[in-house]
Image (spheres, rainbow, N blue to C red):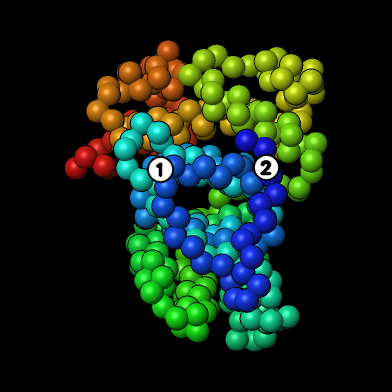
């Protein structure tokens, strides 16, 4: 899953790109593009990767991504539901050259600058504005651009959480190729024991060099990344399956149940049982 450049479909006759995505799964690899992107997930669960952030995603999620920030949503293939999302993408000339420097757009400019690291809005905010995005499908192009500006302004007044803390990826072909191999390996082997010597060999680096490279790139150790990925998969299974907590721990690479509990609480601030209870009240 290389961080590949994804050219946005030609929308030269419009101010921005709007699409409703509906397939069996989100297939786009870990990629980047120079446009801002606002994504609302209407259906599907899985793992969301934004910069150095790895989290389980769920329906009703609203995320704003800045230019050239690598990202992808990977669908949980064990469910039969479709993958559905509504996406808005636009560049710096949305309203013409220099529009963000005008006084009436300063709050929007601040929001867009913050999105360099990826922003996610809380559940209530996401539902309100995500539904507005969905309704835009039936609007005329003129009303749609008005709605986009209103949407950005309203979101600039809301609270949000930064996703890729401390890491904004610079686009680099060599680094992207290494990350491609690392992410793909973790996706396919997270249930098994993985160490720095395996990953170092994969990207033709010594274990020490690999550890330094990974920490410099992701602003976290590989061990932390791996545990975050495993816990995110566990969150997905706790929501989507009725398997026991012990079985889920084993399926996500934790043969030691007490260690699984410690890692799960470290990343979610809840025990697995408390997390599952939120979705099965």
Kindly state the secondary structure of the residue where label 2 is placed.
loop
Residue closest to the eye, 92 or 228: 92
Could one spot residue 242 in this view of the protein? yes
Furthest-left residue in view? 281
Name the spot of residue 232 as percent of width and height, x first: 45, 34
Up/down of 152 relative to 165, above or below = below
Residue closest to the eye, 152 or 259: 152
Name the spot of residue 85 as percent of width and height, x first: 43, 55
Task: Look at 65% across and 86% down and name the residue there.
Answer: 103
Up/down of 105 relative to 120, above or below = below
Dot label at residue 147: none
Where does label 1 land, which residue? 24
Q: How dense is the environment of label 2, judged by Cα within 10 Å: few (below 14), some, or many (20 and up)?
A: many
Up/down of 15 relative to 70, above or below = below
Task: Look at 54% across and 28% down and name the residue there.
Answer: 187
Up/down of 189 relative to 161, above or below = above
Which image quarter is the C terminus in?
A: top left
Name the spot of residue 122 as percent of width and height, x first: 41, 58
Q: How dense is the environment of label 1, judged by Cα within 10 Å: few (below 14), some, or many (20 and up)?
A: some
Name the spot of residue 274 as percent of width and height, x first: 29, 35
Say which of marks 2 and 1 sits in front. Answer: 1
Where does label 2 land, which residue? 3
53 to the left or right of 26: right
Disc with the residue nearer the chain's start (2 vs 1): 2
Do residues under tags 2 and 1 come within 8 Å of each other at their CB atoms? no
Real-space Cα distance between discs 2 and 1? 22 Å
- Give the quadrant of residue 65: bottom right
């Amino acid at each position: 899953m290389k961080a590949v450049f994804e050219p946005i479909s030609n929308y030269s006759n419009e101010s921005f790109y709007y699409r409703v995505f509906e397939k069996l799964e989100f297939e786009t690899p870990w990629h980047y593009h120079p446009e801002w992107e606002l994504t609302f997930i209407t259906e599907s669960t899985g793992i969301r990767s934004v910069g150095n952030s790895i989290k389980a995603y769920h329906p009703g999620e609203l995320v704003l991504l800045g230019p050239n920030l690598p990202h992808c949503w990977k669908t949980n293939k064990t469910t039969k539901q479709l993958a559905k999302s509504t996406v808005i993408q636009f560049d710096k000339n949305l309203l013409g050259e220099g529009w963000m420097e005008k006084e009436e757009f300063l709050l929007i400019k601040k929001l867009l600058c913050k999105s360099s690291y990826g922003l996610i809005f809380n559940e209530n905010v996401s539902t309100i504005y995500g539904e507005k995005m969905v309704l835009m499908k039936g609007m005329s192009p003129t009303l749609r651009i008005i709605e986009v500006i209103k949407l950005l302004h309203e979101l600039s007044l809301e609270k949000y959480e930064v996703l890729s803390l401390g890491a904004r990826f610079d686009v680099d072909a060599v680094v992207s190729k290494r990350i491609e191999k690392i992410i793909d390996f973790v996706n396919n082997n997270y249930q098994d024991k993985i160490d720095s010597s395996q990953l170092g060999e994969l990207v033709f680096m010594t274990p020490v060099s690999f550890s330094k490279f990974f920490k410099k790139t992701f602003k976290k150790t590989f061990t932390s990344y791996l545990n975050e990925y495993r816990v995110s998969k566990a969150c997905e299974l706790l929501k989507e399956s009725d398997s026991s907590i012990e079985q889920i721990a084993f399926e996500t690479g934790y043969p030691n149940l007490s260690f699984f509990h410690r890692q799960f609480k470290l990343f979610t601030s809840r025990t697995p049982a408390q997390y599952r209870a939120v979705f099965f009240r």
